[in-house]
Image (tube, rainbow, N blue to C red):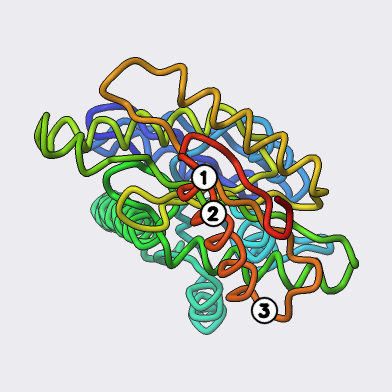
Amino acid sequence: MTEGKPIRALLVENDAEDAAILSRYIRKMKTCAVNLTHSASAEEAGAALAAEPFDLVFLDLELGGSDSGVEVLERMRSDDLDVPVIVVTGSGDESKAVVAMKAGAYDYLVKDTLTVDTLERAVRYASRRHLLEQERKRVVEKLAELSVTDELTGLANRRHLMRKLEEEARRSARTGRPFALLMIDLDHFKDVNDRHGHQIGDHVLKQCAAVLLENLRRTDFVGRYGGEEFCVMLPEASAEGATHVAEKLRQAVDGLSSPVPTISVGVALSQGCSSVEEVVRRADEALYRAKEAGRNRAVLYGHP
């Protein structure tokens, strides 16, 4: 619901007289305007919810037919419809309203004691609660994103990277298809920081991260391993394919303008490794050999 805009509400009520009464009360509300759509059955309600977005649902618990209001509510939740629901019930059916509240309804109204004031209070409460829950979800999602993201480059952080490697190792063990790991290090990166300052150094890291991401498949995974080191995981890759990707990345970074330095790449396959740590060690060893051989090159573990 957006403050100042009419509320798009769906009334699910099979009794025409009750629907007319509730509609009249809704029109009399002073604190908010409501654009009301009426559905006379669970089937009509399902079609309406699928056809357009609603800000609020008034749901009668006794719909008649095979579906009850609680079943409609449960179906909405199983379909991940994030719409606040106010259930409407007759006198003596408060126990059913409690069941509906447990199923996810925000509030309930008793038809025989319904007034414009109680209706407005229920709508205001549902609106505020829904806004607060949406904000809480955004905060939780943001915290979850921050927990797996490197703040500087926007790539996966080391913790998330290692988790993905463990997942890929399990998948590889099930399928028998190896994955490749590229360990990438920026050559002479300390000189960039010393000559140009850490702000420029941070910008260089961002540029390199962007280039790596642009030159990988959607199925590949790249993260910042630490400092000026990046790590790329290539699912179901051969030695030839992994070396080709490593060379492609090296050339892409080499084509960037100064002060972006070149990169050295160590390539290792998971085949024959007993753990993720062993794959990482092999890729790291291949990277060390690339550095020893003069930098700005890719070296495959076990090959000259």
Q: Which mark is residue 293?
A: 1
**Label 2 crowd bin: few (<14), some (14–19), many (20+), radius 10 Å:** many
The residue most toward the bottom is: 95
Quarter residue 197 falls in: top left
Q: Position of residue 58 (x, y in %)?
A: 50, 51
Secondary structure beneath dot 1 equals loop
In this rendering, would 153 be left or right of 161?
left
In this rendering, would 76 be left or right of 147?
right
* Residue marked by disc 3: 275
Q: Is residue 122 visible?
A: no
The image quadrant where one finds the N terminus is: top left
**Label 3 crowd bin: few (<14), some (14–19), many (20+), radius 10 Å:** some
**Label 1 crowd bin: few (<14), some (14–19), many (20+), radius 10 Å:** few
The amino acid pointed to by label 1 is: Ala
Q: Position of residue 130 (x, y in %)?
A: 35, 54
Q: Nearer the viewer, residue 272 or 147?
A: 272
Q: Earlier in the sequence, mark 3 or mark 2?
A: 3
Q: Which mark is residue 81?
A: none
Secondary structure beneath dot 2 equals helix
